[in-house]
Amino acid sequence: MNDPCHIPSVLMSVDDALSLLLSKALPVDEIEHVETASALGRVLAQPQTSTLDIPPAATSAMDGYAVAHRDLHAGTETRLRVSQRIPAGGTGWPLERHTAARIFTGALLPAGADTVIMQEHCHAEGGTVSIPPGTKAGRNVRRMGEDIAAGSEILTAGIKLRPQDMGLAASVGLARLPVYRKLRVAMLCTGDELATPGTPLAPGKIYNANRYTLIGLLQSMNCEIIDFGIVPDNLTATRTMLSSAARQADVVVSSGGVSVGDEDHVKAAAEELGHIELWRIALKPGKPLAFGAIGETPFFGLPGNPVSVFVTFFLFARPFILRRQGITDVLPQTIAVQADFDWPKAGPRREYLRARLTSADDGAITRATLFHHQGSAALSSVSWAQGLVCIPEGKTVQRGQMVNFTSFAELLT
Protein backbone atom coordinates (compact mmCIF):
# COMPACT_ATOMS: atom_id res chain seq x y z
CA MET A 1 0.00 0.00 0.00
CA ASN A 2 1.29 3.46 -0.86
CA ASP A 3 -0.41 5.16 2.06
CA PRO A 4 0.25 3.16 5.26
CA CYS A 5 -2.55 5.01 7.03
CA HIS A 6 -5.15 4.06 4.45
CA ILE A 7 -7.41 1.19 5.51
CA PRO A 8 -9.58 -0.24 2.72
CA SER A 9 -13.32 -0.23 3.33
CA VAL A 10 -13.76 -3.65 1.72
CA LEU A 11 -12.56 -6.91 3.20
CA MET A 12 -9.13 -8.02 2.08
CA SER A 13 -8.77 -11.61 0.89
CA VAL A 14 -6.86 -14.10 3.02
CA ASP A 15 -4.24 -14.55 0.31
CA ASP A 16 -3.69 -10.82 -0.19
CA ALA A 17 -3.47 -10.27 3.57
CA LEU A 18 -0.87 -13.01 3.96
CA SER A 19 1.11 -11.66 1.02
CA LEU A 20 1.13 -8.19 2.59
CA LEU A 21 2.22 -9.51 5.97
CA LEU A 22 5.09 -11.59 4.63
CA SER A 23 6.34 -8.67 2.53
CA LYS A 24 6.84 -6.79 5.81
CA ALA A 25 8.49 -9.67 7.70
CA LEU A 26 12.20 -8.88 7.76
CA PRO A 27 14.35 -11.49 9.51
CA VAL A 28 16.39 -10.48 12.52
CA ASP A 29 20.04 -10.04 11.60
CA GLU A 30 21.82 -10.75 14.88
CA ILE A 31 23.62 -14.11 14.87
CA GLU A 32 24.93 -16.02 17.85
CA HIS A 33 26.80 -19.31 18.06
CA VAL A 34 25.37 -21.97 20.33
CA GLU A 35 26.50 -25.44 21.25
CA THR A 36 25.03 -28.03 18.94
CA ALA A 37 23.53 -29.80 21.96
CA SER A 38 21.54 -26.62 22.75
CA ALA A 39 20.41 -25.81 19.20
CA LEU A 40 17.01 -27.52 19.22
CA GLY A 41 14.34 -25.23 17.78
CA ARG A 42 16.81 -22.48 16.85
CA VAL A 43 16.94 -21.12 13.31
CA LEU A 44 20.14 -21.79 11.40
CA ALA A 45 21.60 -18.52 10.15
CA GLN A 46 24.25 -19.84 7.75
CA PRO A 47 24.50 -23.01 5.64
CA GLN A 48 26.73 -25.72 7.05
CA THR A 49 29.11 -27.89 5.02
CA SER A 50 31.05 -30.98 5.93
CA THR A 51 34.81 -31.13 5.98
CA LEU A 52 34.63 -34.91 6.18
CA ASP A 53 33.56 -37.84 4.08
CA ILE A 54 30.95 -39.91 5.89
CA PRO A 55 31.84 -42.73 6.16
CA PRO A 56 35.49 -41.61 6.18
CA ALA A 57 36.44 -44.92 4.55
CA ALA A 58 34.73 -48.12 3.44
CA THR A 59 33.01 -49.70 6.45
CA SER A 60 30.94 -52.75 7.18
CA ALA A 61 27.16 -52.37 7.22
CA MET A 62 26.69 -55.65 9.08
CA ASP A 63 28.17 -57.97 11.64
CA GLY A 64 29.75 -60.70 9.56
CA TYR A 65 32.86 -61.59 7.57
CA ALA A 66 34.86 -59.37 5.25
CA VAL A 67 36.35 -61.07 2.21
CA ALA A 68 37.83 -60.43 -1.20
CA HIS A 69 35.06 -61.43 -3.59
CA ARG A 70 37.56 -62.93 -6.00
CA ASP A 71 38.40 -65.56 -3.33
CA LEU A 72 34.82 -66.93 -3.35
CA HIS A 73 33.78 -69.92 -5.44
CA ALA A 74 31.07 -69.12 -7.97
CA GLY A 75 28.81 -72.15 -7.50
CA THR A 76 29.87 -73.87 -4.34
CA GLU A 77 30.47 -73.09 -0.70
CA THR A 78 33.79 -71.46 0.17
CA ARG A 79 35.66 -72.22 3.37
CA LEU A 80 38.19 -69.58 4.49
CA ARG A 81 40.49 -69.22 7.45
CA VAL A 82 39.53 -66.32 9.77
CA SER A 83 42.74 -64.31 9.90
CA GLN A 84 41.72 -61.33 12.05
CA ARG A 85 38.95 -59.74 14.09
CA ILE A 86 37.97 -56.09 13.56
CA PRO A 87 35.55 -54.45 16.04
CA ALA A 88 33.94 -51.06 15.45
CA GLY A 89 36.48 -48.38 16.29
CA GLY A 90 39.38 -50.74 15.69
CA THR A 91 41.69 -51.06 12.72
CA GLY A 92 42.76 -54.24 11.03
CA TRP A 93 45.62 -55.03 8.69
CA PRO A 94 45.61 -55.88 4.98
CA LEU A 95 43.58 -59.00 4.36
CA GLU A 96 45.61 -62.07 3.45
CA ARG A 97 44.53 -63.84 0.25
CA HIS A 98 42.04 -66.67 0.77
CA THR A 99 41.17 -65.57 4.30
CA ALA A 100 38.24 -63.77 5.94
CA ALA A 101 38.16 -61.09 8.63
CA ARG A 102 35.59 -61.28 11.40
CA ILE A 103 34.10 -57.77 11.28
CA PHE A 104 31.42 -55.80 13.10
CA THR A 105 29.01 -53.06 12.03
CA GLY A 106 30.78 -49.75 11.46
CA ALA A 107 34.29 -51.22 11.43
CA LEU A 108 36.71 -50.21 8.68
CA LEU A 109 37.16 -52.76 5.91
CA PRO A 110 40.73 -54.03 5.78
CA ALA A 111 42.69 -53.33 2.63
CA GLY A 112 42.01 -56.08 0.09
CA ALA A 113 38.43 -56.77 1.27
CA ASP A 114 35.48 -55.60 -0.81
CA THR A 115 32.50 -57.63 0.40
CA VAL A 116 30.86 -58.47 3.73
CA ILE A 117 28.71 -61.55 4.29
CA MET A 118 26.17 -61.41 7.13
CA GLN A 119 27.07 -63.68 10.02
CA GLU A 120 23.63 -65.31 9.81
CA HIS A 121 24.53 -66.60 6.34
CA CYS A 122 27.86 -68.08 7.42
CA HIS A 123 28.92 -71.09 9.46
CA ALA A 124 32.00 -70.55 11.66
CA GLU A 125 33.89 -73.52 13.09
CA GLY A 126 37.40 -74.03 14.43
CA GLY A 127 38.94 -70.81 13.14
CA THR A 128 37.34 -71.09 9.71
CA VAL A 129 34.13 -69.84 8.17
CA SER A 130 31.95 -71.34 5.44
CA ILE A 131 30.40 -68.88 3.01
CA PRO A 132 27.47 -69.89 0.77
CA PRO A 133 27.62 -69.37 -3.00
CA GLY A 134 25.83 -66.54 -4.77
CA THR A 135 27.21 -63.60 -2.79
CA LYS A 136 27.46 -60.48 -4.94
CA ALA A 137 30.56 -58.31 -4.88
CA GLY A 138 30.31 -55.20 -2.72
CA ARG A 139 27.43 -56.45 -0.57
CA ASN A 140 26.98 -54.88 2.89
CA VAL A 141 29.74 -52.32 2.41
CA ARG A 142 29.28 -48.60 3.04
CA ARG A 143 31.48 -46.76 0.58
CA MET A 144 33.63 -43.78 1.52
CA GLY A 145 31.49 -40.60 1.33
CA GLU A 146 28.37 -42.62 0.56
CA ASP A 147 26.27 -40.60 3.03
CA ILE A 148 28.09 -37.25 2.99
CA ALA A 149 30.86 -36.09 0.70
CA ALA A 150 33.47 -33.68 2.02
CA GLY A 151 32.61 -30.14 0.93
CA SER A 152 28.88 -30.82 0.52
CA GLU A 153 26.18 -28.75 2.21
CA ILE A 154 24.49 -30.69 4.97
CA LEU A 155 22.19 -28.06 6.50
CA THR A 156 20.51 -25.15 4.73
CA ALA A 157 20.20 -21.70 6.27
CA GLY A 158 16.71 -20.77 7.39
CA ILE A 159 15.64 -24.11 8.86
CA LYS A 160 14.43 -24.66 12.39
CA LEU A 161 16.85 -27.18 13.81
CA ARG A 162 15.39 -30.57 14.73
CA PRO A 163 16.94 -33.42 16.72
CA GLN A 164 18.03 -35.15 13.51
CA ASP A 165 19.69 -31.93 12.30
CA MET A 166 21.62 -31.71 15.56
CA GLY A 167 22.77 -35.28 15.09
CA LEU A 168 23.79 -34.63 11.50
CA ALA A 169 25.83 -31.60 12.53
CA ALA A 170 27.54 -33.61 15.25
CA SER A 171 28.29 -36.45 12.80
CA VAL A 172 30.64 -34.16 10.87
CA GLY A 173 32.19 -32.71 14.00
CA LEU A 174 30.30 -29.40 14.33
CA ALA A 175 30.34 -28.53 18.03
CA ARG A 176 28.67 -25.12 17.60
CA LEU A 177 26.15 -23.72 15.14
CA PRO A 178 25.36 -20.15 14.00
CA VAL A 179 21.73 -19.29 14.75
CA TYR A 180 19.61 -16.17 14.73
CA ARG A 181 18.97 -14.75 18.15
CA LYS A 182 15.57 -15.53 19.60
CA LEU A 183 12.78 -13.23 18.51
CA ARG A 184 11.36 -11.10 21.31
CA VAL A 185 7.55 -11.07 21.20
CA ALA A 186 5.53 -8.88 23.55
CA MET A 187 1.97 -10.00 24.25
CA LEU A 188 -0.96 -8.42 26.04
CA CYS A 189 -4.67 -9.09 26.46
CA THR A 190 -7.28 -6.35 26.71
CA GLY A 191 -10.56 -6.45 28.59
CA ASP A 192 -12.02 -5.39 31.93
CA GLU A 193 -13.90 -8.68 31.98
CA LEU A 194 -10.72 -10.79 32.16
CA ALA A 195 -9.69 -12.65 35.31
CA THR A 196 -6.59 -14.70 36.02
CA PRO A 197 -7.03 -18.46 36.56
CA GLY A 198 -6.56 -19.34 40.22
CA THR A 199 -8.44 -16.26 41.44
CA PRO A 200 -12.17 -16.14 42.35
CA LEU A 201 -14.41 -15.42 39.37
CA ALA A 202 -16.57 -12.39 40.10
CA PRO A 203 -19.92 -11.84 38.36
CA GLY A 204 -19.47 -10.69 34.77
CA LYS A 205 -15.85 -11.90 34.61
CA ILE A 206 -14.29 -14.65 32.49
CA TYR A 207 -10.95 -16.34 32.83
CA ASN A 208 -8.29 -15.12 30.44
CA ALA A 209 -7.84 -18.10 28.12
CA ASN A 210 -6.22 -16.06 25.36
CA ARG A 211 -3.12 -15.34 27.42
CA TYR A 212 -2.42 -19.03 27.85
CA THR A 213 -3.19 -19.83 24.23
CA LEU A 214 -0.76 -17.15 23.06
CA ILE A 215 1.92 -18.21 25.53
CA GLY A 216 1.68 -21.80 24.27
CA LEU A 217 1.78 -20.74 20.63
CA LEU A 218 4.82 -18.53 21.18
CA GLN A 219 6.58 -21.16 23.28
CA SER A 220 6.05 -23.69 20.48
CA MET A 221 7.90 -21.25 18.20
CA ASN A 222 10.79 -20.85 20.64
CA CYS A 223 10.22 -17.11 21.06
CA GLU A 224 11.38 -14.99 23.96
CA ILE A 225 8.06 -13.90 25.48
CA ILE A 226 7.49 -10.55 27.18
CA ASP A 227 4.14 -10.85 28.93
CA PHE A 228 2.34 -7.58 29.69
CA GLY A 229 -0.69 -9.37 31.13
CA ILE A 230 -4.16 -7.80 31.14
CA VAL A 231 -4.68 -4.20 29.96
CA PRO A 232 -7.78 -2.29 31.14
CA ASP A 233 -10.33 -1.12 28.61
CA ASN A 234 -9.28 2.51 28.33
CA LEU A 235 -7.32 4.35 25.69
CA THR A 236 -4.63 5.75 27.98
CA ALA A 237 -3.70 2.39 29.51
CA THR A 238 -3.78 0.70 26.11
CA ARG A 239 -1.56 3.36 24.56
CA THR A 240 0.92 3.15 27.45
CA MET A 241 1.17 -0.63 27.30
CA LEU A 242 1.54 -0.77 23.51
CA SER A 243 4.23 1.88 23.58
CA SER A 244 6.18 0.05 26.28
CA ALA A 245 5.78 -3.27 24.48
CA ALA A 246 7.03 -1.85 21.19
CA ARG A 247 10.18 -0.50 22.84
CA GLN A 248 11.11 -3.91 24.25
CA ALA A 249 10.11 -6.35 21.52
CA ASP A 250 10.62 -7.28 17.87
CA VAL A 251 6.89 -8.00 17.46
CA VAL A 252 3.86 -7.01 19.54
CA VAL A 253 0.79 -9.26 19.70
CA SER A 254 -2.42 -8.27 21.46
CA SER A 255 -5.82 -9.92 21.77
CA GLY A 256 -9.12 -8.06 21.89
CA GLY A 257 -9.99 -4.43 21.38
CA VAL A 258 -9.69 -4.29 17.57
CA SER A 259 -13.36 -4.21 16.67
CA VAL A 260 -15.60 -1.11 16.53
CA GLY A 261 -17.13 -1.11 20.02
CA ASP A 262 -16.92 1.77 22.46
CA GLU A 263 -14.52 -0.25 24.63
CA ASP A 264 -12.26 -1.33 21.76
CA HIS A 265 -9.17 0.89 22.06
CA VAL A 266 -6.32 -1.14 20.57
CA LYS A 267 -6.77 -0.03 16.97
CA ALA A 268 -7.11 3.64 17.96
CA ALA A 269 -4.03 3.48 20.22
CA ALA A 270 -1.98 1.75 17.54
CA GLU A 271 -2.93 4.41 15.01
CA GLU A 272 -1.84 7.15 17.42
CA LEU A 273 1.50 5.46 18.05
CA GLY A 274 2.15 4.29 14.50
CA HIS A 275 -0.06 3.09 11.69
CA ILE A 276 -2.43 0.29 10.70
CA GLU A 277 -2.06 -1.31 7.26
CA LEU A 278 -4.57 -4.10 7.59
CA TRP A 279 -7.74 -4.38 9.59
CA ARG A 280 -10.55 -6.47 8.12
CA ILE A 281 -10.09 -9.79 6.32
CA ALA A 282 -12.58 -11.94 4.41
CA LEU A 283 -12.12 -14.67 6.97
CA LYS A 284 -14.29 -16.59 9.42
CA PRO A 285 -13.56 -16.77 12.29
CA GLY A 286 -11.41 -13.68 12.77
CA LYS A 287 -12.53 -10.85 10.48
CA PRO A 288 -11.19 -7.99 12.67
CA LEU A 289 -7.41 -8.46 12.52
CA ALA A 290 -5.21 -5.40 12.83
CA PHE A 291 -1.68 -5.33 11.47
CA GLY A 292 0.69 -2.40 11.29
CA ALA A 293 3.52 -0.92 13.30
CA ILE A 294 3.95 0.89 16.59
CA GLY A 295 6.88 3.11 15.78
CA GLU A 296 9.11 0.69 13.90
CA THR A 297 7.87 -2.44 15.68
CA PRO A 298 5.44 -4.70 13.79
CA PHE A 299 2.11 -5.11 15.56
CA PHE A 300 -0.69 -7.70 15.45
CA GLY A 301 -4.04 -6.89 17.00
CA LEU A 302 -5.86 -10.23 17.15
CA PRO A 303 -9.60 -10.55 17.82
CA GLY A 304 -10.87 -11.25 21.33
CA ASN A 305 -12.86 -14.44 20.75
CA PRO A 306 -10.74 -17.44 21.77
CA VAL A 307 -11.13 -19.42 18.54
CA SER A 308 -10.50 -16.31 16.44
CA VAL A 309 -7.30 -15.68 18.39
CA PHE A 310 -6.05 -19.19 17.70
CA VAL A 311 -7.04 -19.28 14.02
CA THR A 312 -5.73 -15.83 13.12
CA PHE A 313 -2.46 -16.45 14.93
CA PHE A 314 -2.06 -19.82 13.18
CA LEU A 315 -2.83 -18.43 9.73
CA PHE A 316 -1.21 -14.98 9.89
CA ALA A 317 0.89 -14.17 12.94
CA ARG A 318 2.70 -17.50 12.94
CA PRO A 319 4.02 -17.28 9.34
CA PHE A 320 5.02 -13.66 9.95
CA ILE A 321 6.91 -14.52 13.13
CA LEU A 322 8.56 -17.52 11.49
CA ARG A 323 9.79 -15.33 8.66
CA ARG A 324 11.10 -12.77 11.16
CA GLN A 325 12.93 -15.60 12.92
CA GLY A 326 14.77 -16.24 9.66
CA ILE A 327 12.82 -19.33 8.57
CA THR A 328 12.32 -19.59 4.82
CA ASP A 329 9.48 -22.13 4.60
CA VAL A 330 6.70 -20.56 6.68
CA LEU A 331 3.37 -21.50 5.13
CA PRO A 332 1.45 -24.43 6.66
CA GLN A 333 1.12 -27.52 4.50
CA THR A 334 -2.31 -28.72 3.42
CA ILE A 335 -3.52 -32.15 2.40
CA ALA A 336 -6.63 -33.17 0.48
CA VAL A 337 -9.11 -35.24 2.50
CA GLN A 338 -12.69 -36.35 2.00
CA ALA A 339 -15.43 -34.35 3.70
CA ASP A 340 -17.48 -36.42 6.13
CA PHE A 341 -19.96 -33.56 6.40
CA ASP A 342 -22.19 -31.26 4.39
CA TRP A 343 -21.63 -27.49 4.28
CA PRO A 344 -24.60 -26.27 2.25
CA LYS A 345 -24.37 -22.51 2.77
CA ALA A 346 -21.85 -20.57 0.69
CA GLY A 347 -20.40 -17.62 2.57
CA PRO A 348 -18.69 -14.42 1.36
CA ARG A 349 -15.67 -15.10 3.61
CA ARG A 350 -13.20 -17.97 3.61
CA GLU A 351 -14.12 -20.27 6.48
CA TYR A 352 -11.83 -22.41 8.59
CA LEU A 353 -13.65 -25.24 10.34
CA ARG A 354 -12.29 -27.21 13.26
CA ALA A 355 -12.00 -30.86 12.26
CA ARG A 356 -10.57 -34.26 13.05
CA LEU A 357 -9.35 -36.90 10.63
CA THR A 358 -10.57 -40.48 10.50
CA SER A 359 -9.62 -43.28 8.14
CA ALA A 360 -11.57 -46.03 6.46
CA ASP A 361 -10.98 -49.56 7.72
CA ASP A 362 -8.57 -50.22 4.87
CA GLY A 363 -6.83 -46.89 5.43
CA ALA A 364 -7.39 -45.90 1.80
CA ILE A 365 -9.51 -42.79 2.45
CA THR A 366 -8.92 -40.08 5.04
CA ARG A 367 -12.06 -38.21 6.08
CA ALA A 368 -12.57 -34.94 7.94
CA THR A 369 -15.22 -34.77 10.66
CA LEU A 370 -16.33 -31.42 12.06
CA PHE A 371 -16.77 -30.36 15.65
CA HIS A 372 -20.47 -30.01 16.43
CA HIS A 373 -20.22 -26.29 17.24
CA GLN A 374 -18.17 -23.96 15.02
CA GLY A 375 -18.75 -20.72 16.95
CA SER A 376 -15.80 -18.36 17.48
CA ALA A 377 -16.15 -18.56 21.27
CA ALA A 378 -16.10 -22.39 21.43
CA LEU A 379 -12.49 -22.92 22.48
CA SER A 380 -13.29 -26.59 23.09
CA SER A 381 -13.54 -26.97 19.30
CA VAL A 382 -9.85 -26.08 18.89
CA SER A 383 -8.77 -28.41 21.68
CA TRP A 384 -10.84 -31.24 20.18
CA ALA A 385 -9.70 -30.66 16.60
CA GLN A 386 -6.58 -31.90 14.86
CA GLY A 387 -6.61 -29.10 12.31
CA LEU A 388 -8.61 -26.81 10.06
CA VAL A 389 -10.71 -27.54 6.98
CA CYS A 390 -10.75 -24.63 4.53
CA ILE A 391 -14.00 -23.72 2.80
CA PRO A 392 -13.26 -21.18 0.02
CA GLU A 393 -15.34 -18.08 -0.42
CA GLY A 394 -18.65 -18.70 -2.16
CA LYS A 395 -18.30 -22.50 -2.04
CA THR A 396 -20.46 -25.27 -0.63
CA VAL A 397 -19.38 -28.79 0.29
CA GLN A 398 -21.22 -32.06 -0.03
CA ARG A 399 -20.28 -35.16 1.89
CA GLY A 400 -17.68 -37.12 -0.06
CA GLN A 401 -16.11 -34.12 -1.78
CA MET A 402 -12.42 -33.40 -1.32
CA VAL A 403 -11.43 -30.49 0.92
CA ASN A 404 -8.12 -29.01 2.08
CA PHE A 405 -7.00 -29.76 5.64
CA THR A 406 -4.18 -28.10 7.59
CA SER A 407 -2.89 -29.97 10.63
CA PHE A 408 -2.19 -28.40 14.00
CA ALA A 409 0.79 -30.76 14.26
CA GLU A 410 2.79 -28.03 12.50
CA LEU A 411 2.57 -26.00 15.71
CA LEU A 412 5.01 -28.41 17.32
CA THR A 413 7.52 -28.52 14.44
Image (tube, rainbow, N blue to C red):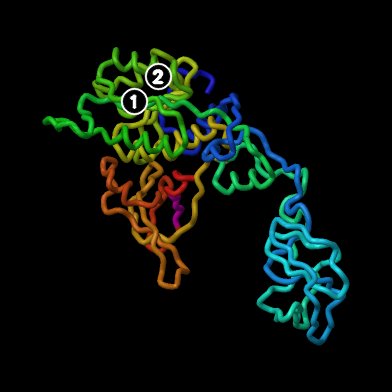
Task: Estimate the x, y position of residue 124 in percent, counting from the top left.
Answer: 71, 79
* Image side of residue 298 versus residue 166, left or right: left
| Residue occupying image coordinates x 80% and y 78% | 80
Residue 187, above or below 285: above
Q: For the magenta stretch, what is the residue range?
A: 403-407
Outermost residue, bottom direction?
76
Q: Residue 331 or 33: which is nearer the viewer?
A: 33
297 lies above or below 286 = above
**Tally of numbered tags:** 2
Q: Which residue is mark 2?
A: 245
**Mark 2 or mark 1, which has the lower sequence index?**
1
- Cα separation between marks 2 and 1: 9 Å
Labels 2 and 1 touching (C-beta < 8 A): yes
Q: Which amino acid type is shown beneath numbered disc 1?
A: Leu
**Amino acid type, label 2:** Ala
Say which of 108 and 322 sits in front. 108
**Percent x, y for residue 185?**
44, 27
- Residues 358 and 142: in front is 142
> Regarding mark 2 in the picture, which secondary structure is present there?
helix
Q: Can residue 399 be seen at all in this image of the molecule?
A: yes
Q: Position of residue 7 (x, y in %)?
A: 43, 23
Q: Which residue is mark 1?
A: 188
Q: Position of residue 238 (x, y in %)?
A: 31, 17
Is residue 24 shown above or below 41? above
SS under mark 1: strand
